[in-house]
Image (cartoon, rainbow, N blue to C red):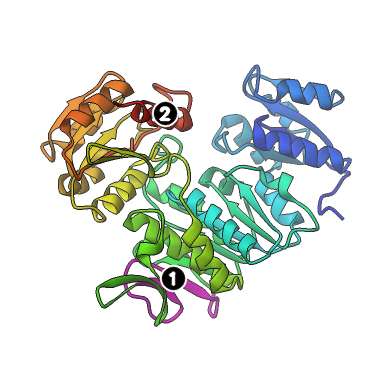
Amino acid sequence: MSLIASDHFRIVVGLGKSGMSLVRFLAQRGVSFAVADTRENPPELATLRRDYPQVEVRCGELDVEFLCRADELYVSPGLALATPALQAAAARGVKLSGDIDLFARNAKAPIVAISGSNAKSTVTTLVGEMAAAAGKRVAVGGNLGTPALDLLSDDIELYVMELSSFQLETTNQLGAEVATVLNVSEDHMDRYSGLPAYHLAKHRIFRGARQVVVNRQDALTRPLMSEGQPCWTFGLSAPDFKAFGLREENGEKYLAFEFQNLMPVRELKVRGAHNQANALAALALGHAVGLPFDAMLASLRNFTGLEHRCQWVRELDGVSYYNDSKATNVGAALAAIEGLGMDMDGKLILIAGGDGKGADFSGLRDSVAKHCRAAVLIGRDAGLIADALGDAVPQVRAGSLDEAIALSRSLAQPGDAVLLSPACASFDMFKNYEERGQLFARAVEVLA
């Protein structure tokens, strides 16, 4: 039985991937609804008109009177709640909600909920693979891959959900079995008034959570907790009670839980301290929902990383090339620079730049000074990054990605690595971060 009143009128606002999943969900349950989108030709409009010709759809500027016909608006994550028409509807008593809220009301299996400025896709994928290795019927999605509502099934034993701050803005009570915010650093400052507002949005993931997982090295990940609420931690320091971390024994570094060594770090196929932290976070989340260590560790040994996330492309003339195009904010770039920098003998040639989304790049300076030989800067906000880095390292500008790769190759020495970790969105030069990463990998693969 669906937990949704069918006698009320709803409007789906935003006809992208999640909007279309809402359309399917509501139509299957016989709920009365319409669709609105600020764009004249939204991505799923043709599909909607073909499959649901009876559904009213309005494109273009949002009409407040139309929105106020609804009891509830399901707002796309891509549309800011501060949009005047939405605020006007809310002021007149219309409830603002989203697909994750609806998913949470209808999910019958426990939810592992994962957010963070960086690494959430990697950790979500890892926990999903761990659950599958343990023999669980698991569904993985949300902000990653399949929209949440398309995952709903009575057969599922565990949901593993990646959730963005945009999705969480409209999530009022998630009620996850275990929830985490992996890390918090400036992102989407073109949408939020500042870091506190972004932080508040992220922390909505903890509403109704039965257990929490906290990053010991990031105080902004720790929520206000009720007394007795189970809390597990992860970090790169030695762990103690209810904690996952790193231990060293006879010169060998281990992933560890409390006072027990689990596996040598060298058995991980993914490189860098940040990937060790990701592995520990996944172990903490899996342990919280009762996954056995043997299945989780087997998954870690097999995991080769996600495309565009510090992905090794090739080695040429003693220099490794890494595609970290998914680093669309400063925090993600820092994780890659520090993670790889701490894990190699040589230096990094950093390729960075693009659309900075209003971010402050000054946080890059110290890590770049410590781990990089040079910075090759591209894209619209190259000048802002150059100013923020100052004299930390030698800088060069490139007019294209191909030129940036050629310059990086000439600057690198044997034992170094060339790292595409832009700290910026890609929209000034590319369709998306995937295209940016694919073009980088393709160009590097054909280097003679």
255 over 76 or under it: above or below: below
Quarter of the image for the C terminus: give it: top left
How far is the residue under mark 1 from the one under mark 2?
Answer: 35 Å
249 over 116 or under it: above or below: below
238 over 61 or under it: above or below: below
* Horizontal and vertical percent position of residue 22: 74, 39
The residue shown at (79%, 21%) is 49
- Residue 233 badge: 1
Residue nearer the viewer, 86 or 388 = 388
The residue shown at (40%, 27%) is 442
| Residue 89 seen in the figure | no
Q: Is residue 242 magenta?
A: yes
* Horizontal and vertical percent position of residue 116: 46, 52
Sooner in the amino-acid sequence: mark 1 or mark 2 = 1
Q: Is residue 323 left or right of residue 174?
A: left
The residue shown at (39%, 61%) is 277
Q: Residues within 10 Å of mark 1 (few under 14, many from 20)?
A: many
* Horizontal and vertical percent position of residue 61: 63, 20
Residue nearer the viewer, 286 or 411 = 411
Quarter of the image for the N terminus: give it: bottom right
Classify mark 1: helix, strand or loop: strand
Q: Amino acid under label 1?
A: Thr
Residue numbers of the magenta segment:
226-246
Q: Is residue 422 magenta?
A: no
Q: Is residue 2 left or right of residue 165?
A: right
Q: Main secondary structure of the magenta part?
A: loop
Residue nearer the viewer, 11 or 22 = 22
The residue wearing badge 2 is 436
